[in-house]
Image: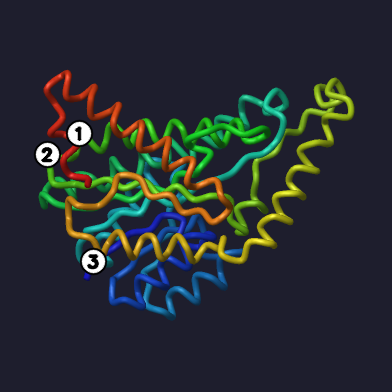
């Protein structure tokens, strides 16, 4: 059984994944920005189930370093890191202020980098580890009104491509999980633009994002298989696979989009291996199936 750290453990994917892991005998620690407020009930439930909870803000380097160290101490080690903390955004791209974009990237991209820099010395020293990342189907393609969020997940996918190769020689495997849209609290905390002057310039089109969001909600209501528990199942399935034999990308989707993203991923996999082979460094891909 593994010792697992989940960032954003109180979120829509973090909680069911933590509970599923502990039910299978894994030891779990998880981070929240604050134990109080809206997280209090979830934190209490997770602790009652056996999780170790640490307060950690992935947008703050000192907080992240302290939180990861506390989690490793609480677990007595670390084998699996699940970079799950994230924030969403939604709205017409021009209306998104640069400061709003920076906030999304600070959590979804730079936040992951802070966590990795805090955890990797431990994983490298032991010569083995598994790192999971929550990306998105729209970390592979871009859809209207999700430009900032998609950009952050595209950036995440890029740095994970590099981590995959650069860490393989240290026995650290990398796995990206790409969910489709899920009915979680993610939609309650979206960063949205607030620029009424520019919005007026879009006329009636300014109402389209709201209508589109309503349509997505209806689709999710009509797709009961599309639930956060599918992420927990994917994580369990990955951890059941032998070290070094896990797929680099795992699509989790029941809306019909998933197969197209898998086709895209297969092509990119072949292109990546061909390019690295041309440079004589294809062995850096061997730690994933």
Q: Would you say the residues marked 2 and 3 are in contact, meaning their CB atoms lie under 8 Å apart?
A: no
Q: Nearer the viewer, residue 98 or 286?
A: 286
- According to the picture, the residue beneath numbered tag 3 turns out to be 2
Q: Give the CA distance from mark 1 to mark 3.
A: 23 Å
Which residue is found at the position 53% from the left and 39% from the top?
A: 138
In the rendered image of this protein, does residue 68 appear above or below residue 3?
Answer: above
Which residue is found at the position 63% from the left and 61% from the top?
A: 223
Q: Give the CA distance from mark 2 to mark 1.
A: 7 Å
How far across and down, in percent of the image, does residue 194 sit?
76, 33
- According to the picture, the residue beneath numbered tag 1 turns out to be 166
Going by the image, does 77 lie left or right of 236? Answer: left
How far across and down, in percent of the image, does residue 51 sit?
38, 72
Q: Give the CA distance from mark 2 to mark 3.
A: 21 Å
Disc assigned to residue 169: 2
Which quarter of the figure is the N terminus placed in?
Answer: bottom left
Helix or strand or loop: what does disc 3 sit on? loop
The quarter holding residue 94 reads top right
The quarter holding residue 163 reads top left
Q: Residues within 10 Å of mark 3 (few under 14, many from 20)?
A: some
Q: Nearer the viewer, residue 110 or 173?
A: 173
Going by the image, does 230 lie left or right of 126? Answer: right
Helix or strand or loop: what does disc 2 sit on? loop
Looking at the image, is mark 2 or mark 3 earlier in the sequence? Answer: 3
Disc assigned to residue 69: none
How far across and down, in percent of the image, does residue 263 sit?
42, 39
Which residue is found at the position 65% from the left and 45% from the top?
A: 190
In the rendered image of this protein, does residue 63 appear above or below residue 158?
Answer: below
């Amino acid at each position: 059984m593994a010792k697992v750290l989940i960032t954003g453990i109180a979120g829509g994917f973090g909680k069911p994944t933590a509970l599923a892991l502990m039910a299978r005998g894994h030891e779990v620690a998880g981070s929240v920005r604050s134990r109080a407020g809206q997280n209090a009930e979830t934190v209490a439930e997770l602790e009652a189930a056996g999780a170790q909870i640490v307060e950690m803000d992935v947008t703050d380097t000192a907080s992240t370093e302290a939180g990861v160290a506390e989690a490793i101490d609480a677990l007595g080690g670390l084998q699996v890191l699940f970079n799950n903390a994230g924030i969403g955004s939604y709205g017409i791209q021009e209306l998104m202020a640069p400061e709003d974009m920076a906030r999304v990237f600070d959590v979804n991209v730079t936040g992951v980098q802070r966590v990795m820099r805090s955890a990797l010395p431990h994983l490298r020293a032991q010569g083995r580890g598994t790192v999971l990342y929550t990306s998105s189907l729209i970390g592979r393609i871009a859809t209207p009104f999700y430009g900032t969020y998609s950009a952050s997940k595209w950036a995440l996918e890029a740095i994970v491509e590099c981590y995959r190769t650069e860490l393989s020689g240290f026995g650290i495997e990398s796995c990206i999980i790409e969910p489709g849209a899920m009915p979680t609290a993610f939609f309650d905390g979206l960063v949205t633009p607030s620029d009424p002057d520019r919005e007026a310039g879009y006329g009636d089109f300014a109402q389209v994002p709201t209508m589109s969001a309503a349509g997505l909600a209806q689709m999710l209501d009509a797709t009961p298989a599309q639930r956060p528990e599918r992420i927990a199942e994917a994580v369990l399935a990955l951890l059941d696979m032998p070290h070094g034999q896990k797929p680099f990308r795992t699509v989790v989707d029941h809306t019909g989009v998933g197969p197209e993203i898998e086709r895209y991923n297969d092509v990119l996999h072949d292109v990546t291996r061909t390019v690295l082979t041309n440079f004589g460094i294809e062995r850096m891909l061997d730690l994933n199936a």
